[in-house]
Image: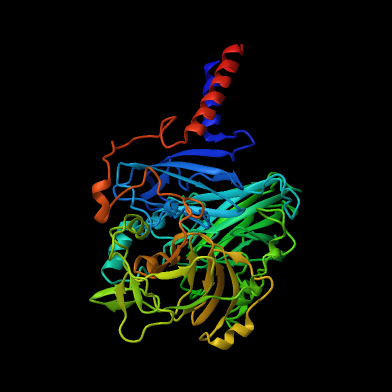
Amino acid sequence: MWRALAAAVVLVVAVVRPAAATDPYAFYDWDVGYVTAAPLGVKQQVIGINSKFPGPTVNISTNWNVVVNVLNDLDEPLLITWNGIQHRKNCWQDGVLGTNCPIPSGWNWTYEFQVKDQIGSFFYFPSTGLQRAAGGYGGVVVNNRDVIAVPFGRPDGDITIFIGDWYNKNHTDLRKMLDSGKDLGMPDGVLINGKGPYRYNDSLVPAGIEYETINVDPGKTYRIRVHNVGTSTSLNFRIQGHSLLLVETEGSYTTQQNYTNLDVHVGQSYSFLLAADQNASSDYYVVASARMVNDSLWRRVTGVAVLRYSNSGGRASGPLPDPPQDQYDKSFSMNQARSVRWNLSAGAARPNPQGSFRYSSINVTQAYLLRGTAPVEIAGRRRATLNGLSFTPPETPLRLADAYGVRGVYSLDFPERPIRGAPRMGRSIINGTYRGFMELIFQNNDTRMQSYHMDGYAFFVVGMDYGEWTEDSRGTYNKGDGVARSTVQVYPGAWAAVLVSLDNVGVWNVRSENLDSWYLGQEVYVRVVNPEDTGNKTEMAIPDNALYCGQLHKYQKQQTPHHRMGASAARPAAVVSRVAAAMLLLVGAAMLSP
């Protein structure tokens, strides 16, 4: 009886479905700490969640409220950010240093936010000090509400795949390398779901490496969600002998196109439909290989998993499926990126079609050309810049400083174009116009790939090309079905342009998703403030459990280390009462059961 009761209580705490008048809540307790693993055969500390690497998947639906209690069992401060989750009116939950104080070692903090007006495939990760290079990441799946049709048949399964480059050095050693002015160098390999490569080649892959196996049944169709959670390497994803039908990226349904392979750049997420319709005489390779690099030098930096049919006749063998043969066609990958288009006839979080938002008919009110270059030396330190400025996170987070009237933390004078003269460090941010329409042009004058991400928003990718962006480049923009997403790739010596409707109040991070560039200062914040005092109609109030640091540290109350969230801690009273009522019903049911 009590075993059944325990299982019932766990079910209630994990997911609560309250009455129809209130959007549902999902509760999670996460212990974030080090675990020992050897994904490439070398033992090292990785960051796990509840001792798992990668961490658990947050599986929810549109409009659900998410409550995640995070216990920081690391030996350094921690923040969790939610890549692509828009946090409507609530940058307090964004989990980056510009808006939140980090969670001290041994402390816990509870994130609470609503995934309003969103569907799709996203991921979370630790945002400070290169911690993502050590793990701590996991998936976020936001399902359609039952009343909103999905533009494809219901898959027989849903599979999340994390791909990313990996170093055998701990993230603390990688930090020291960057602090000393060094490059991180070539990674030691590529992981798939936290595991090393299948031994497809005895000379390149040592024996004893644990690899990922993806199990499927013949004749069924699976939704495959692929996330590049690596440090800085663009990866080409492919499954031997199978087509990948692209259906969604970072919260937008796409026009449905088949790919034999697709480049997934750092920080990006895609979902495909995979039909298990091939001969099962043997297993098939699942490959993630480095792109935009010297292929002969980077051969060992390849992730390999196995797709296994339930009636498989044997192990995968032979050479890997070829990557794109585009050594003499530098436009191949860019043309592939341009082919990802918005599905204008599909609904998503709301019943109206995605294409009902006519972005091309809105007048641009602000335009910023953000130029990134290779790292430079500033005041004796190696730094990365946007428009010649290298951002240094303040001790007092920007949004917290606003709330308490602390002056001098930042300046609202980020330049619309690259500055003239020597690059410098600073805390200049963009003053966004509430309900304005902003154009951001990312110009990559570095020699390697970059990805750029904007928290709190999805933007429309309207153009990309090689060379320097000019005013005339606007004539090449896609004015109809540019896909809405939160992370865009920018090729070396090229530009990418996005449009974003500034309807989400807060202070929002725009950054390089390449961890080394981000760590060295290639980021800026956009401050979006409603000039009218509307209470919490356009922005949530500062949460009761806010952490304080910097000039506001005097407001911080001490916390007992290793505190876990109880039934009533950090949960709205109405929610607690619903949980209690449900638990009482379950107790009664359990006591009546034989």
Expressed as whole percent of the image width and height from the top left, the position of residue 377 reads 28, 78
**Quadrant where the N terminus lies?**
top right
Q: In the image, residue 113 lies at what x, y percent?
A: 49, 47
Q: Position of residue 136 (x, y in %)?
A: 43, 50
Residue 434 in the figure: left or right of residue 349: left
| Left or right of 590 in this view: 522 | left
Examine the image and state in which quarter residue 183 appears.
Answer: bottom left
Asked if residue 161 shows in the view, the reply is: yes
From the viewer's perspective, is 63 left or right of 456? right
The residue under the point 39% across, 60% down is 167
Residue lying at 48% horizontally and 48% vertically, measured from the top left: 54
Q: Nearer the viewer, residue 398 or 434?
A: 434
493 or 350, which lies in front? 350
**Residue displayed at 32% across by 55% down:** 404
In this view, 223 is above or below 9: below
Numbered-mark total: 0
Asked whether the viewer can see residue 216, the reply is no
Can you say whether 181 is above or below 505 in the image? Answer: below
